[in-house]
Image (tube, coloured by chain):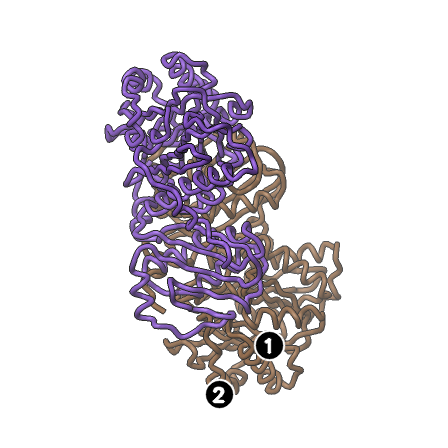
Chain colours: A brown, B purple
């Protein structure tokens, strides 16, 4: 390996507190509007004090929630944005024209109270598919939400976007770019699709970098490909999945230009933030007891490597073996082989942690007891080398446990 | 719906006993060679009394067992074949050149004892990946296997090819084609990949029809696309999957020509046999408590419909909902949407049995108690209508239960 596999890139960046409010010029808040039966916080708002460049990556599902198509049409215009409002309780998917009207109404309400145009407010929803948003409750909670906005509100917003997640997910990194202190922060929620389709992977990123819309979109898209597109809890893609990113330039750095070292550093920061959040989502998968990391190298290209890693991480047999503590290289080999990427199985090499299990396509003797012990730990790392090219990639998942079945089978709509 | 969905086609054919020995001129046997620790039958042989036309459909996995590449090279030559030998215990995959030599040796041993050329013997293996075949045990058992060949041995062979399956799977159909009584029989095994990769879907078909190699191959391929390619237990594709079919012409019918009514009838019989076996495999999936049938109609074309049906049947969330008895149309809609087939979600209709759950993309009120009761039964049928074209297709799966996790997690290699 001549190049480091992406998750190792991040050592150069300094972790800082504050999540989405770590970068300068952002405020955030999370409050309870009564959308969740539990009474927990369920309404989050992130606001940039000045106009920000927006970027977004959205679900490829044919069934799209109202907020997805709304944000796509706003971001397509390339105009500045200021805020992201997120509701947690109803997904506002499969809700027809009434759902679209409600979504646009939310943006108008927030815009009026912030004194900005409605088209500067992005929206996100997560929760039960097929239910209309509880508009009266949201309207009643908005004044309190906006009063609560704070430059220390990042973690509060991180909690308010959760549904069935067990833990909030947030991070922020800092780097010196061309003499300026630049930060990127993020929050996310995930955890599979349960409580019928309390679905959805959401992530919101902020930065005080200055960057033009096409480069910001490209940086976000590449980071998502390395991170959120490489995690899997159960292989399902939600109607509401989205990643949004705002960059407001308040670090003072001159606009970062494509092709420069500064652009490369900013891209690596965004990728590191996304990878951190993606791993946190995978680790918090429904019923998960451990993080599963699949590293693929020696593939024809990075895209092929990432594809193979994803298929292995998504194999129920590999996931069940990780839960049971079985060093089952055969399931890994079989999953790699069905990823649609041609390779010569006579060159295949598979490692579990440091244990070499398969070399040149043939199983080797190994210390089974020690390997089983390693598998009982967290995380579990499989490394697959195709020995056929420079391509490499990583995917993350979790084990498949009795609790996954319990959570998803016992709920009644 | 103007056309019947494929599984309804079969009413015109008469079920008969005998499995692969129902067609004239076939003998079969299954004996115990000691390859399975349980001592159960593990060596099966099917022999045609005269030269037969062979066809085969094989795994697309990049990691292929020795028997897969061996059969592919034999069938590519289009020459007649006479026999299929199947071993159950070791998969003979990831076994290198020694595995290839052993596989060829098996064919030679059988050929010598039958007095036929070695290239008229096809081979199949199922079992643990990475273990060499136990050649001495197989060699010792061959005389008894060949002595046991019988025109009533179809069911005996059906039992000898099983690994973790709970029940043998076999069927045979009869039809009058152009005044001749023609039969098609089949046996199969499946049941997911366990006991590390006691993998593999195998099916062997026989017929006393007379047919040229290209048409026989086409008939088998189309039947597999409607059946075995539409079932899923856990989404994994094995290193050893194969479907083989022999046609020996002993019904007396003149060679069936492509494009005729006779060819159409023969193709429907082969498809029905494959669908019967495929459903039996899905119903016998690891930990399954019921069969899940997903019918898709109104798609742009049949291929798209089958793709969507497969993705729904393979969704762990849909499978867990079926186990738990939850009428969760949202999971079905979300799975349909991520199948890679564009459709307008505002036209989407979803039924559970006779319950209309979603119409024009919007959920309808329904009798929840009655729907839950329906879901407790077996089979469970979801029908998805895209209202966008004539395409239709069906896929089968099983529910996801605690036992799936137990079987796949608790085994230690």
Q: Nearer the viewer, residue B377 or B17?
A: B17
- Is residue A244 toward the left or the right of residue A257 in the image? left
Q: Chain of mark 2?
A: A
- Is residue B78 toward the left or the right of residue B136 in the image? right
Where is residue A188? Give x, y as percent. 51, 65
Q: Is residue A216 visible?
A: yes
Residue A339, compared with residue B205, is above or below; it is below
Residue A360, compared with residue A46, is above or below; it is above
Which numbered disc covers residue A140?
Answer: 2
Q: Chain of mark 1?
A: A
Tag in front: 1 or 2: 2
* Disc 1 to disc 2: CB gap under 8 Å: no
Mark 1–mark 2 Cα distance, whole angstroms, equals: 19 Å
User: Which tag, 1 or 2, sits closer to the chain's start?
Assistant: 1
Q: Nearer the viewer, residue B204 or A250?
A: B204
Secondary structure under badge 2?
A: helix
Q: Nearer the viewer, residue A351 or B141?
A: B141
Q: Nearer the viewer, residue A173 or B383?
A: B383
Where is residue B158? Give x, y as percent. 32, 33
Q: Residue at x 30, y 37 (%)?
A: B168
Residue A253, compared with residue B32, is above or below; it is below
- Give the residue pinned by disc 1: A47
Q: Residue A272's quadrant in the figure?
A: bottom right
Where is residue A280? Give x, y as percent. 47, 58
Q: Is residue A155 visible?
A: no
**Mark 2 neighbour density, 10 Å: few (under 14) some (14–19) many (20 or more):** few
Q: Residue at x 38, y 31 (%)?
A: B126
């Amino acid at each position: 390996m001549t190049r480091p596999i992406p998750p190792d890139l991040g050592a150069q960046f300094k972790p800082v507190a504050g999540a989405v409010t770590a970068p300068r010029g952002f405020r955030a808040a999370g409050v309870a509007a009564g959308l969740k039966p539990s009474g927990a916080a369920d309404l989050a708002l992130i606001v940039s004090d000045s106009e920000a460049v927006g970027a977004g990556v959205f679900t490829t599902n044919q069934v799209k929630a109202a907020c997805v198509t709304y944000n796509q049409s706003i971001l397509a215009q390339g105009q500045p944005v200021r805020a992201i409002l997120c509701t947690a309780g109803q997904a506002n998917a499969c809700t027809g024209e009434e759902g679209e009207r409600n979504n646009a109404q939310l943006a108008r309400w927030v815009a009026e109270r912030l004194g900005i145009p409605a088209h500067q407010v992005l929206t996100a929803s997560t929760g039960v598919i097929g239910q209309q948003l509880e508009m009266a409750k949201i309207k009643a909670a908005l004044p309190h939400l906006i009063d609560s906005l704070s430059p220390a509100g990042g973690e509060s917003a991180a909690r308010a976007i959760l549904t069935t997640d067990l833990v909030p997910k947030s991070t922020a990194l800092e780097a010196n770019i061309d003499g300026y202190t630049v930060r990127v922060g993020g929050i996310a929620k995930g955890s599979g699709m349960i409580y019928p389709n309390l679905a959805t992977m959401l992530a919101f990123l902020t930065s005080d970098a200055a960057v033009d819309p096409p480069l910001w979109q490209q940086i976000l898209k590449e980071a998502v490909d390395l991170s959120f597109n490489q995690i899997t809890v159960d292989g399902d893609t939600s109607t509401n999945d989205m990643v949004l990113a705002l960059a407001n330039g308040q670090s003072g750095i001159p606009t970062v230009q494509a092709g420069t070292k500064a652009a490369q550093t900013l891209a690596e920061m965004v990728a590191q933030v996304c990878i951190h959040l993606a791993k946190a989502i995978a680790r918090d998968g429904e019923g998960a007891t451990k993080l599963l990391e699949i590293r693929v190298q020696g593939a024809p290209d990075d895209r092929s490597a990432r594809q193979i890693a994803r298929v292995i991480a998504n194999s129920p047999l590999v996931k069940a073996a990780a839960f049971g503590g079985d060093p089952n290289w055969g399931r890994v080999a079989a999953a790699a082989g069905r990823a649609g990427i041609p390779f010569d199985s006579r060159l295949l090499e598979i490692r579990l942690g440091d244990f070499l299990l398969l070399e040149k396509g043939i199983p080797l003797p190994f210390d089974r007891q020690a390997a089983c012990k390693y598998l009982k730990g967290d995380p579990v790392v499989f490394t697959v080398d195709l020995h056929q090219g420079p391509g490499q990639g990583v995917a993350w998942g979790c084990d498949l446990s009795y609790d996954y079945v319990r959570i998803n089978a016992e709920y009644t709509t």
